[in-house]
Amino acid sequence: MADMNKSMRQRNGDGGFVATTGLVVFAMLGALSVWTGGCNKKDIQIAEPPRITEVKTPAEIRRSELLSRLEKKFEDPQAHYELGHLYQDDGLWAKAQYHYSVALTFDPSHRPAQAAMVKALAAAGDVEKSKLSADIYLDQVSGSATESTKLALEFQKEALDEHALAAYKQALRLAPTSALINRQIGYYYLSKNNIDLAKEYLTRSFQLNPNQPDVAGELGRLGVAVQIPRKTGDPKKVDKMVESGSTP
């Protein structure tokens, strides 16, 4: 009987321990609930994920601007040309050719688009069509020294040396006494580091019109002695005609 009472006291003691432990845990959870419930929501800051800002390149910005221009006025040859050149810079030759073609549809004498089309066709592997296009454009300006010079300059910008030289020579045949055209050819050869031919054409240009300080300076750097006239005179009549676009 004594053993039974002892056993009952132990069980009651264990039960009491369990009950006491449960009350402590419950009290702690209750206190935590009261503390969190009493906190101001403003005091709890949840970190937001960083916002990713899309950074556009200057080319992408310009492309968006040109597309907006074309939405307002599709028949804008300059916008098509510039957009085509952006695609050309990215190696998207088909898109470049499309926009050059549209530019030339609205302005058949758009020299930059003509030269760019020749470049795009060649870069895309259609060399035969590229050469044919260049010949067509050269033929279109075969009656004008001014337009031949303009086309030559655009060919030169596109690094189409063969076509640029052909256009320059065509211009010179039409206006052999033009100081302006001789000067352009001289600078062309200078850009190709062909010093002898650069001297030849720049010297001829200066002889035709001595009132060219820039040409005189370039000849001086090339070792050619020149003398700038004290009195300023008008350019030769043919150059006035070339600059105004009225030469044959």
Image (cartoon, rainbow, N blue to C red):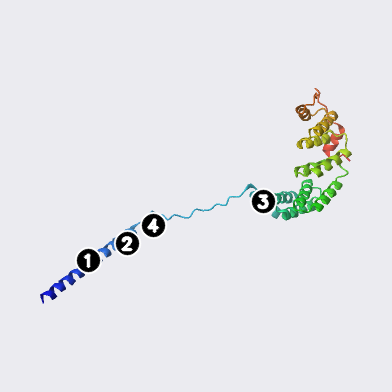
Residue with the mark numbered 2: 33
x and y percent of residue 42 in the render? 39, 55
Disc 3 to disc 1, how far (Cα)?
76 Å
Disc 4 to disc 3, how far (Cα)?
47 Å
Disc 2 to disc 4, how far (Cα)?
14 Å
Neighbour class for label 2 at 10 Å: few (<14), some, many (≥20)? few
The quadrant in which the C terminus is found is top right
Quick check: can you spot residue 73?
A: no
Residue at x 65% of width, y 52% of height = 64
Q: Specify which label sits upstream in the sequence, 2 or 3.
A: 2
x and y percent of residue 62 in the render? 66, 49
Total count of labels? 4
Residue with the mark numbered 4: 41
To which quarter of the image does residue 159 belong? top right
x and y percent of residue 150 in the render? 80, 42
- Contact check, label 2 and label 3, Cβ < 8 Å: no
Residue in front for this viewpoint, 35 or 83 = 83
Q: Please indicate whether residue 51 sits to the left or right of residue 157 in the image.
A: left
Q: Please indicate whether residue 2 sits to the left or right of residue 186 in the image.
A: left
Label 2 vs label 4, nearer the camera: 2
- Contact check, label 4 and label 3, Cβ < 8 Å: no
Quick check: can you spot residue 43?
A: yes
Q: Specify which label sits upstream in the sequence, 4 or 1.
A: 1
Neighbour class for label 4 at 10 Å: few (<14), some, many (≥20)? few
Q: Specify which label sits upstream in the sequence, 4 or 3.
A: 4
Label 1 vs label 2, nearer the camera: 1
Residue type marked 1 = Thr
Residue at x 29% of width, y 60% of height = 31
Disc 2 to disc 3, how far (Cα)?
58 Å
Neighbour class for label 1 at 10 Å: few (<14), some, many (≥20)? few
